[in-house]
Amino acid sequence: MPVMTEKANPNVKTDKLNAGTKENKKVVYNTKDLNLWYGEGHALKNINLAINENEVTAIIGPSGCGKSTYIKTLNRMVELVPSVKISGEILYRERNILDKSFKVEDLRTSVGMVFQKPNPFPKSIYENVAYGPKIHGIRDKKILDEIVEKSLRGAAIWDEVKDRLNQNAYGLSGGQQQRLCIARCLAIEPDVILMDEPTSALDPISTLKVEELVQELKEEFSIIIVTHNMQQAARISDKTAFFLNGEVIEFAETDKIFSTPSDKRTEDYITGRFG
Amino acid sequence: MKYVDSTQVHKKMGSRLFANNLAKTLFFLATLFGLVVLVILIYRVLADGLGWINFDFLTNRLSTDPERAGIWGAILGTLWLMLVVAPVTMILGVGTAIYLEEYAAKGRISSFIKTNISNLAGVPSVVFGILGLTVFARALDLGSVVLAGGLTMALLVLPVVVVASQEAIRAVPQFLREASYGMGATKWQTIKNVVLPASLPGILTGVILALSRAIGETAPLVVIGIPALLIPVPDGIFDKFTILPVQIYYWTIDSALVAEYANLAAATIVILLIVLFAMNSIAIMIRNKFQKRF
């Protein structure tokens, strides 16, 4: 692949990058010419990314490069920030989620999110997991019980909490809380799971557990994970996008990014020369 | 050469330390003044009134005979008044707070509303009395009944509830709202299931403090036109009524005619203070119990 120039046309860049993928997996998220401003600050510049289903896509880059902003745009959570302006298209399963007619509640039912800091509700473990199904109208206690068990098993935390489902989630350790949050997210049976630095507040062992979990979950879900930790990206992802100053510098197979990056800046970043 | 001359410093040390101690003493006396006055007040009230408090005083109706007079009517009037004030002020106050914190776009209009709510808190209570008299008692033709008084009081204490609720709602961490929105919850579902349960202790504290203010207010109800003495015990919100502080007010005025009325007033003050301290203690207990949960 040729070395890219500083101001390469982002469309061309993505097309070339996507040409490198041989499998015929479906695209779940297709971002086209996405620009985002916080007031006057241009936070995302001409983002073009096609993300495949049933893969783990990692987004790496230094602080302030726009990676968190990007992932929050994928479920329009970014709109909670006042004064945010967005242009371009994000096609989720071929529908533009930035279209006014697209209901965010619909989107967020299909696209779950796990946050940087574990954020369980100050309710019981059971109520935390049942929260999503309940707001979507499931009232039947038997169905809720099944969802709670299935989700907690899915997040590999069932054995640790099955005897104390009615205790407050705040009594769990940080790592358990984060897996509970993943279980809570699984309970809405999403299609895509967005993870915004899910292990940054966790100790190494809890981090390992979450990483193993991500590997299992990708069989069933498409996962997009923002991470500060390059080893983590290398360990768990299929594709990696490198963000810098609001732009996608490089997007390719993770193996390729970490062995033979085509951009000098990617190489500098992953070898620890900056960031 | 040195800028700090140690002999000069030493010479002034005495007066500096004197000023230091003087400041401490002055501030201590300032603190003491309020406490001493409160103690004297409570002592006087207890000395005058304690002997008059007994079961009959609590359960008897009003009477011109001090030996037979009781405050049953004022107690029931206060209860009925609270039954109007509590729900009205809670619905209006919490509703306003939710709108301002969760829905209103942060801008000129919302800060204009917020400023005016603070201004409302500064309006003298007698002005609210006039509002109650013109709007509720006369324009709506309710007369000087519990409902008119309650609505007036609810407006009077509304700012307290709004401000306390706003603070409680603002203290709910943003990450809890994000967690809820992230699962596709609507704004109302998020408010109902996450924000309100988490801010309820703070809101309740505000409501109780507001009620304890309403219980002690006299001026608005006097303006609305509560009859001076010998009114029947109220059975509902459409009855004429009196409340504890108004009872104290009239007995104090009339003590020029019958000296024992002063003792009845003091006894009523004791009852009112007990109720107020109890309510404030409950508010503080709620606040302490639910503090720092996040």
Image (cartoon, coloured by chain):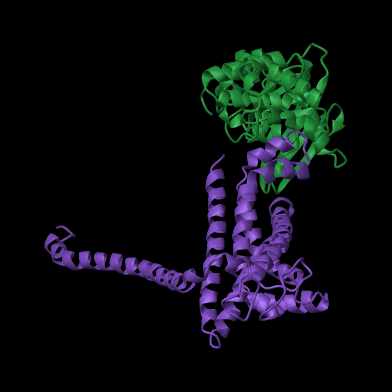
Along the viewing direction, whichever of A54 and B69 lies nearer the viewer: B69
Q: Quadrant of the N terminus of chain B?
A: bottom left
For residue A141, above or below residue A55:
below
Chain identifier, colour purple: B
Image-based side of B191 in relation to B2, left or right: right
Choose between B240 and B211: the one closer to the eye: B240
From the top left corner, tell me how far across and down residue B92 is, in percent.
Answer: 73, 60
Q: In the picture, residue B154 is in which quadrant? A: bottom right
Residue B233 percent across, percent down from the top left: 71, 70
Residue B44 x %, y %: 43, 73
Q: Position of residue B265 (x, y in %)?
A: 54, 75
Pick the residue in front: B205 or B1.
Answer: B205
State whether residue A253 appears in this view: no
Vertical position of residue B62 compared to residue A50: above or below: below
Furthest residue in direction left, as rendered: B7
Q: Colour of chain A?
A: green
Q: How many marks?
A: 0
Q: Is residue B274 above or below residue A62?
A: below
Residue at the (58%, 21%) spot, across then down: A230
Res A202 → quadrant: top right
Image vertical order of residue B221 relative to residue A26, above or below:
below
* Left or right for B6, reference A206: left
From the image, which quarter does the C terminus of chain B lie in?
Answer: top right
Res A206 visible: yes
Which one is nearer the viewer's eye here, B142 or B114?
B142
Q: Residue furthest bottom?
A: B257
Name the image quarter holding residue B237. Answer: bottom right
**Residue occupying image coordinates x 83% and y 77%:** B141
